[in-house]
Structure formats: structure tokens, C-alpha cells
Image (tube, rainbow, N blue to C red):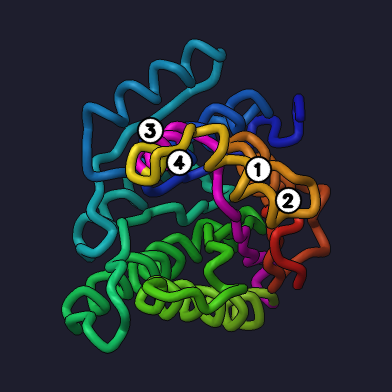
Amino acid sequence: MTNLLQDKIVVISGVGPALGRTLALRCAAAGADVVLAARTQARLDEVAKEVTDLGRRAVTVATDITDQDSAEHLVAASVEAYGRVDTLVNNAFSVPSMKPLARTDFQSIRDAVELTVLGALRLTQLFTPALEESKGSVVNINSMVLRHSQERYGSYKMAKAALLAMSQSLATELGPKGIRVNSVAPGYIWGDTLKGYFAHQAEKYGMTVEQIYQATAANTDLKRLPETEEVADAVLFLASPMASAVTGQCLDVNCGEFHH
């Protein structure tokens, strides 16, 4: 992946301890300088230090993407820092309501759509002038929830399905400006967050984490779960010149759990 994004400027929203952090580090390792956005400044500072340790620049901007003024400040700070933006990665995420839709309160659904869909749209709208100038790209982080209708995922699937529809429409609208818009839909991501969840499940059912892993991975073609770095690398591909003719697409990274 070395030099895949050499001297590109990548803005990443939702930088937390999991995929957001890995995205930042993989982009830096591929030669990019980054803008890191999330609500928690302390977390941004930690990831920024790791980026600079890799020899690349990192700008941190505490941002609430559901707030117009905050989002506008992110765009201004990004352009001021680097003079350009090549890729926007919409990675902001919140834990969805896990109740059946029949018992899910509407405010929970509104909150999910506000962050997942409208937050991503807000940033894409605001970064469009800069992305048009650089003939850049947008990568939206989706989910394999698109591919199933399992119980309790209804409100999450509603938000992610709307995000996919939005991505496809934006690809059509922004294509004439030279801007590519794509999505990555991860399956279960084998990282610290999922490890914690599996540990909880193992205790609940009197099993080991390894047994929970094997039972989950059994549903995939590769008999394993994708790791955080593998999901990040799919994002890097779509952001890179290697995907210069790819837009309006959703790249599933789920080790073959679902086929699309």
C-alpha cells in the first residue's frame, strides 16, 4: 500500500479507537496527510500523534457533524491547513437501537438518520467545492446490515440503506464535477470492539470467545472475520488512483458472509 495515496489529503470523520483510527494510520502509511474529525478532542490527539510518528501530518478538528456551524468549521480548517482536500471518508457511527422496529421510538431512528445519513450528506455538500478542484472522492462507510433482515437491526438498516441510496445519487450528481462517490460495507470487524462484544456473549452463554468466533465465522466463505486493516484497505483502494473509474459502487468486505 506504500505510496498509494502519496501526498493526498484525506479527511476522516468519526475517528475513534476502532476503524477511524486504523483508517488514519493506513492512510498515513500510504503517504497521505490527514484531517481527523470527531467530537472527542483527546481521542483525536492520540491518533494524531500516531500519524505524526509515521512521518505524516495530522490536523485535528473537534467536530459535531450534526451541527452546520461545526461542520463548516471542519471544512474551513481543512482547507486552511492544506490548501486542498482529495478524499472525504464519512465514518461517523453511533450504536443503533437494537429493538424491534415495532417497539423502536421514532427519536432513536431520527438520531440515527441525522448522524449516519444527513451528517454524511452535510460534509459531502460542504466539501464538494474542494473535491471538485482536486477531482477527488468520497467514501462512505456502510455495513453488511444492508444484506440481511435479521431481527433488531431494523432502524440501523433503515439508516444504512438511506446512506447507500444517497451515495448512489451523489455519484450521479457529482460525477460531472470529477468527484467519485463509493461505499464500503464491512461485515463483523475483528477488532477490539467486537472482541469485547464476543467476550460478553461468551460469558452470557457459557462459551469461550474462540467458540463464539468460530460460530460466527462459520457463516463466511473464508471461515474467518475481516480485520480492521482489511476494511481500511478497501477504503484506501476506492480513494486511490487505482479506482479512478469506479464510482457509485458498494464494496462488501465480509469474507464472503453475504454475496451481492
Image point (76%, 57%), residue name: 256
Q: Nearer the viewer, mark 4 or mark 3?
A: 4
As measured in the structure, the alpha-carbon distance from the residue carrying label 3 to the one carrying label 2 is 23 Å
Q: Which residue is mark 1?
A: 226
Q: Is residue 194 magenta?
A: yes
As measured in the structure, the alpha-carbon distance from the residue carrying label 1 to the one carrying label 2 is 6 Å
Looking at the rendering, in which quadrant would you find the N terminus? Answer: top right
Res 177 quadrant in image: bottom right
Say which label, 4 or 3, has the lower sequence index: 3
The location of residue 201, given as percent across then percent down, is: 39, 44
The answer to whether the residue labelled 1 contacts the one labelled 2, judged by CB atoms less than 8 Å apart, is yes
Checking the image for residue 17, the label placed there is: 3
Seen from the viewer's position, the closer of residues 191 and 11 is: 191
Say which label, 3 or 2, has the lower sequence index: 3
Identity, as a three-letter code, of the amino acid under mark 1? Pro
Q: Which residue is mark 4?
A: 194
Say which label, 1 or 2, has the lower sequence index: 1
Q: Nearer the viewer, mark 3 or mark 2?
A: 2
Q: Secondary structure at mark 1?
A: loop
As measured in the structure, the alpha-carbon distance from the residue carrying label 4 to the one carrying label 3 is 12 Å
Horizontal relation, residue 222 to residue 186: left or right: right
Seen from the viewer's position, the closer of residues 122 and 78 is: 122
Q: Is residue 230 magenta?
A: no
Q: Which residue is mark 2?
A: 255
Image point (62%, 79%), residue name: 168
Q: Secondary structure at mark 2?
A: loop
